[in-house]
Image (cartoon, rainbow, N blue to C red):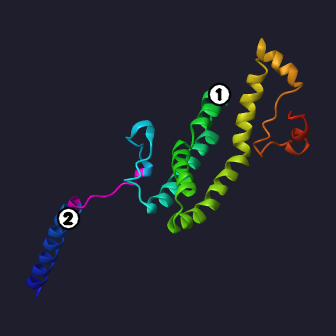
């Protein structure tokens, strides 16, 4: 009895080792297709290679780009260093490059060649894109970092920039960011300046 249990156990163990040794070889023969929208194009001027892109690539690429944009914004907000032009304004400007690239390609395709699959994808990604824009526009922590840099740098203006500041009558509002605490009373719609 013990001998047959041992042989059965040994046999199953050998079989499982053999199966795991064969599995990677089988998988290595299959090529895993990468989403071409998530990789920079090798064509001139970074033009999208539509020969490589499938309609089914857009939704996962946009979802991944949104995820990366969120991570980049969160890194700016969570930065423990005092807000500076480099770690706030420049980081914000450089964030979302993948998102911008993928959505520009997708939007061009929607305008130029909307198929039923693309229309379905558009219906799925529109609320995702709106949610991301709202998260960024209403992000009070991000707005506060931007405002801190803006207020500090604006006070340092001199020369022509100082004259431009005087012509404006007051500092320009950052109220395009909806997180501005005084957006409702800033009078931006009539004067274009924050009060």
Report the front residue among 60 and 105: 105
Q: Position of residue 187 (x, y in %)?
A: 91, 39
How far from the left and from the top, in percent, is residue 194?
Answer: 86, 34
Disc 2 to disc 1, how far (Cα)? Answer: 51 Å
Instruction: Report x, y in % for residue 99.
Output: 54, 48
Helix, strand or loop under label 1:
helix
Residue 106's place in the image compared with 86, above or below, is below
Left or right: residue 154 versus residue 187 is left
Stretch of the chain drawn in magenta: 28-36
The answer to which image quadrant residue 110 occupies is bottom right
* Residue drawn where x is 15% and y is 73% of the image: 15
Q: Quadrant of residue 156?
A: top right
Q: Quick one: which residue is furthest to the bottom in this view?
A: 1
Q: Badge 1 local density, few (<14 within 10 Å), some, or many (20+)?
A: some
From the viewer's perspective, is residue 159 above or below residue 177? above
Q: Residue at x 54, y 61 (%)?
A: 114
Would you name the residue on which mark 2 appears? 26
Q: Position of residue 188 (x, y in %)?
A: 87, 39
Q: Residue at x 50, y 67 (%)?
A: 117
């Amino acid at each position: 009895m013990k001998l047959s249990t041992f042989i059965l156990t040994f046999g199953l163990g050998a079989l499982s080792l053999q199966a795991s040794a064969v599995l990677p070889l089988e998988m290595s023969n299959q090529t895993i297709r990468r989403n071409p929208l998530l990789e920079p194009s090798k064509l001139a001027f970074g033009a999208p290679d539509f020969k490589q892109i499938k309609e089914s690539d857009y939704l996962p690429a946009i979802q991944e780009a949104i995820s990366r944009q969120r991570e980049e914004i969160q890194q700016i907000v969570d930065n423990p260093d005092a807000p500076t032009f480099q770690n706030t304004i420049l980081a914000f400007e450089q964030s979302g490059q993948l998102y911008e690239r993928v959505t520009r390609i997708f939007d061009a395709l929607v305008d130029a060649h909307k198929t039923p699959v693309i229309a379905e994808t558009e219906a799925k990604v529109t609320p995702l894109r709106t949610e991301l824009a709202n998260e960024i526009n209403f992000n009070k922590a991000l707005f506060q970092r931007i405002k801190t840099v803006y207020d500090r740098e604006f006070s340092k203006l001199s020369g022509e920039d100082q004259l431009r500041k005087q012509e404006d009558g007051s500092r320009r509002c950052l109220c395009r960011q909806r997180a501005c605490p005084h957006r409702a009373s800033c009078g931006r719609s009539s004067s274009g300046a924050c009060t």
